[in-house]
Image (cartoon, rainbow, N blue to C red):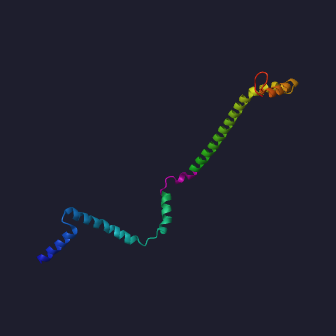
Amino acid sequence: MLSLVEARAIRAESVLGESTFAKTFIVTILVLALPFLYASLRLRDLDPQQLAPATAEVLNWVDPCQHQTTQNAAVQSELNAELVAHQNTATQDSERRIDREVDLLFAPVEAQVDDYLDWYFTVIGEYERLAALATGKFCRNDGAAT
C-alpha cells in the first residue's frame, strides 16, 4: 500500500513540479480556468441581438445628458447664427476697407485726369506725341510717361 501511495506522489511531483511556487502556479491557473470554462459553456447559446433593445434602454436611462439634447440643439443653432452674423460683419468691414483703400489709391490719378485730357486732345499735344515717338522719348513735357 505504501508503495502505491509513494508511486502516486512521485507521479504528481513529476507533473506539478517539486517547488511550492510551481504547485501554487498550476493550482491558480486551474482555479482561474474553471470559472471561465463555466461562463463559456453557459453563454455559448446567447444571442447578442436579444440584448440590443434592453441595452439601448439602459444606456438612455444612464445617459446624464439625454434631457439636454433640445437645449444643446438650441445652443448650437444660436452659435451658428452668431457665426454667420460675425462672418457677414467681417465681410462688410473688409469690403469697406478695400473700397476706402482703392479710393485713396486712385484719388491722385483722378485729380490729374482733366489735365491729361486737356493736353491729349489739343493740337500741341498731338505734335508732342508725334515728336516723342519719332525721337524715341515718348513722354510729356513734365517728364511723366504716357
Residue 72 vs 121, above or below: the answer is below
Asked whether residue 118 is in view, the answer is: no
Q: Please indicate whether residue 23 sits to the left or right of residue 59 in the image.
A: left
- The C terminus lies in which quarter of the figure? top right
Residue 67 vs 139, above or below: the answer is below
- The N terminus lies in which quarter of the figure? bottom left
Residue displayed at 60% across by 45% down: 79
Magenta span dominant secondary structure: helix
Q: Position of residue 84 (x, y in %)?
A: 64, 43
Q: Position of residue 99 (x, y in %)?
A: 71, 33
Q: Position of residue 124 (x, y in %)?
A: 86, 23
Q: Please indicate whether residue 66 sits to the left or right of residue 97 in the image.
A: left
Residue displayed at 48% across by 64% down: 54
Q: Which region shows up in magenta?
A: 62-70
Magenta stretch encompasses residue 65: yes
Name the one closer to the observer, 68 or 29. Answer: 29
- Total residue callouts: 0
Q: Quadrant of residue 91?
A: top right
Magenta stretch encompasses residue 15: no
Residue 115 vs 12, above or below: the answer is above
Q: Quadrant of residue 137?
A: top right
Name the one closer to the observer, 55 or 131. Answer: 131
Q: Please indicate whether residue 53 sits to the left or right of residue 102 in the image.
A: left
- In the picture as drawn, the residue positioned furthest to the front comes out as 135
Residue displayed at 25% across by 63% down: 25
Q: Position of residue 122 (x, y in %)?
A: 87, 25
- In the picture as drawn, the residue positioned furthest to the bottom comes out as 1
